[in-house]
Amino acid sequence: MKFKLTISFIFGLVGLLIFTFFAALIAVIDYRVTSKLEGVLWTVPAKIYSRPLELAEGVNINSNNLIKELKMLSYKVERDPDSPGEFNFSQNTLNIFLRGYLDQKPGLFRVTFDDSKINNIKNQLGLSEDLIKLEPTVIGGMYPVHMEDRVLLNWPEVPQKLLDTILAVEDQNFFNHYGVSLKSISRAFLKNIQAGEVEQGGSTITQQLAKSLFFSSEQTIRRKVMEAIASLLIEFHYSKEEILLAYINDVFLAQSGRRAIHGFGMGAQHFFGTSVNNLSIDQIALLVGMLKGPSLYNPERNPNNATKRRNLVLSILNKSNKISDSEFEDLRLRELGITPPNYRAEIEYPAFHDIVRLELQKNFADKDLRTKGLSIETNLDPVLQNSLENSLAKTKDQLIKKYGDKLNDLEGAAIAVDISNGEVKAAAGSTKPKSYGFNRAINAIRPIGSLVKPFIYLTALNNYDEYNLSTILDDSKLSLVSGGKVWEPDNFDKKFHGQVPLHVALWQSYNIASARLGIELGFEAVQGMFSDLGIEKEVPVYPSIFIGSFELSPFEAIQAYQTIAGDGFYTPLRSIRQIKDTKGEIELSYPYSIEQRIRPEPIALIKFAMQQSFVRGTARGYSKKQIDLWNAGGKTGTSDDQRDSWFVGFAGDILVLVWLGFDDNRQTPLTGRTGAFQVWKNFIDEIKPVTAPSTSLPRIQYVWTDLEDGLKSGEKCKNSLLVPFIEGTEPTLVPESRKRCSGRGKMSENSVIDKLKQIFEGGQS
Amino acid sequence: MKYLLKVAAILSLFFVFACSSTDSGRNISDFTIPVNNFSKTVELLISDENFLEDEILKINAQNPSVQRIIKSADDFLKQKNYIVANSELERAFRITKMDGALYLRLAHLRYKQGLLKESESFAYKGLLLPNISSWERLLLNVYLKN
């Protein structure tokens, strides 16, 4: 009796232990199933996009830049484009078969140009279209530690043909089993025997999901049991639609560098450069076929295997009446049609990415950026970005040829912004722009040299009751005590120039005239102007700041110049347009914001003086016609001992700032003109900006003045220049010596005035 | 009747403005746009925000593509979805930066968002365009004295 009790007890205890073990095992698997399916699977890295290019009637666009962009997006040149991703450009006409993006449907469009302006856009039926949209480039992402990348699809976004193909190939009985199906295993076994190859796997979709989520690929009884338990639990917790959707979003399709491509949304993007909704049946067949062996059937590495596998999937679809015989014949002969990914897996443009990241950190936690699948639409123009990077590298090579190996370590930064709305279009933080490290565009704080002068002169011109462009400044020797030391500024040419009109002192970049003007205006007034221009730093109270000892980063400096180029309207620079969540709703936008800080008339005067830098100053070299067309203006800057070479200039609708120098602050052989200006020139010559937007300033009058004494002159007089003035501030006194030539020129003066007014005021005279 | 009176008032103001826009004899320290002298009257007359909005939304863009986008922006504005309305206006702005219809809407949108200084700045910037009509000029002036 005692013995029987002991046996029963032991059996009971063992039973209890086994039960407890299995219960615990199931509980652990259940926990992993639910936490993984509701957690990690739905973590999607934020993706950073370039701006999507919209083509519309009336848009000014350089067609060469457009073609460059199409090539960057992996569009192929074809004589007669008839498939997504093909285009042809000839005789001012672009025929393009769009891949489709968001609300832009795929299709063939004809865009005709009139010089650099889009004349009209027509669709395949010959009907006019208002605008068409090109897909943006993905320029990077914010990846989680596991580096899984996916484009999350919601149920309505999954095309029926994808569902049909997955179910036909992977699990025909999906809606009728509970996660594990003996029927599926036996049917697959028989089919594969008949076909002589592996057409179907025996695992259900639920089992495949369980395997991919929790288990390694080892083939052991233990793993199969665990997988079966997990499958039953998944079926217990989730509906069939939820399981299918999780599968569609989770399947592993390829490895791209360190990035793992998961899900059909990302697969469509990676292999075909489009969204899953735009995939054709043969493309879907390829992706579904790859599930059996992502590496073996990778269309990039093993195109023959991939073609065979795709055709096998197509034959399954044909046998299950999803496609007709003729469709099958047509589809199986198609090329794979994969496009080189227009997707930059790693960070393609580090300096720009850095600016975006800093902006994002103000509003988002790092975890959210790595998991919430945010779409970050930036203002990056990929063509301008590449050109800017190339110009920096190309100019450095040219400078090394000219000055020798001592410039091997020359570094640089450049930023391009849209004058009107402050959108940052491109940024480079090194002469090796792909290197990811110190971003000089935002972090190199350097003395800005003569780039400070327009700020000083604008302070004066804004005080229009006392100063105009002809006001005489004193460029004679200056000696004063500052900080206990004698300070005696020099001009670059080591000469004194005596009495010079204000605009001449600016485009000739005379240091002493500027220093005297700054002292005359006072630190407070100059600080006020700095602040109006958007410089948040405090101006140190020592006179050398008036000739450029003041330090700014390239980004801070271009912000101030944006206010000048933008007619006195301060516009915070923006690298991001908007951020959308996975449903396409705007989560945060960075709206175009302006604040009128300086009247446009004084700004027009300083822009005129900056234009003279191009006509006769340190940025000369362009034809007058070109300068007028672009309404170009700029300023060179060289710091003490030529340690920093700067140039900032506007042309058309673009403002570009360039800095060159050494990281260790040693001397360079470069001035603003011989260094940074050459980068600017290489860039502008390559991108060829379109015409500048014009403004109407009725209170600006043009008067011929003398280049030496600044008094009224005439077109026929020597050394005269037509200079703008705010109405009522123009010089009226004509010296006796010029009365004759100024009188004779009166008739023609008006015609030139009209011409200049057209340039500055957009045809309003 | 009230509506007709308003239209008549605005038209007479428009007439007065058109007749006097060539005025140039003013103090050199005043560099604002000539129509500014009437802004107080404009403010008094156009005191009905809905009426003002109706008038602004009637201003069409010169470019058909831009017109299509601003129509969409107008719909969002009416639904008080200011973020998307702004996003649409910025799309249009990238196509053309020279259309008074856009600046009017941006000035109005910022006004609706309570950003009065920005509203004024957009209006001021719009007034610098060379090809705006006198009617657009007058409406832009309304936002200068917000």
Image (cartoon, coloured by chain):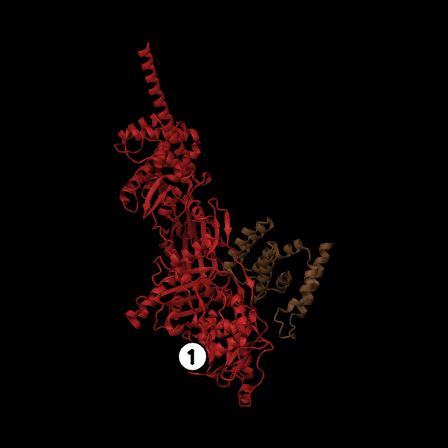
Q: Amino acid at mark 1?
A: Asn
Residue at far right of view: B1
Residue at far left of view: A196
The colour chain A appears in is: red
Dividing the picture into quadrants, the one containing residue B6 is bottom right
Rendered view: A23 above or below A410: above
- Residue B39: image x %, image y %? 67, 64
Q: Chain of mark 1?
A: A
Q: Please tell me whether mark 1 sits on a helix, a strand or a loop.
A: loop
For the question of whether residue A123 can be seen, the reply is no
For the question of whether residue A421 can be seen, the reply is yes
**In the visual, does A757 lie left or right of A276?**
right
| A458, A293: nearer the viewer | A458
- Residue A443: image x %, image y %? 41, 61
| A695, A214: nearer the viewer | A214
Looking at the figure, which quarter contains the C terminus of chain A?
A: bottom right
Q: Which residue is mark 1?
A: A491
| A63, B81: nearer the viewer | B81
- Residue A259: image x %, image y %? 34, 47
Dividing the picture into quadrants, the one containing residue A532 is bottom right
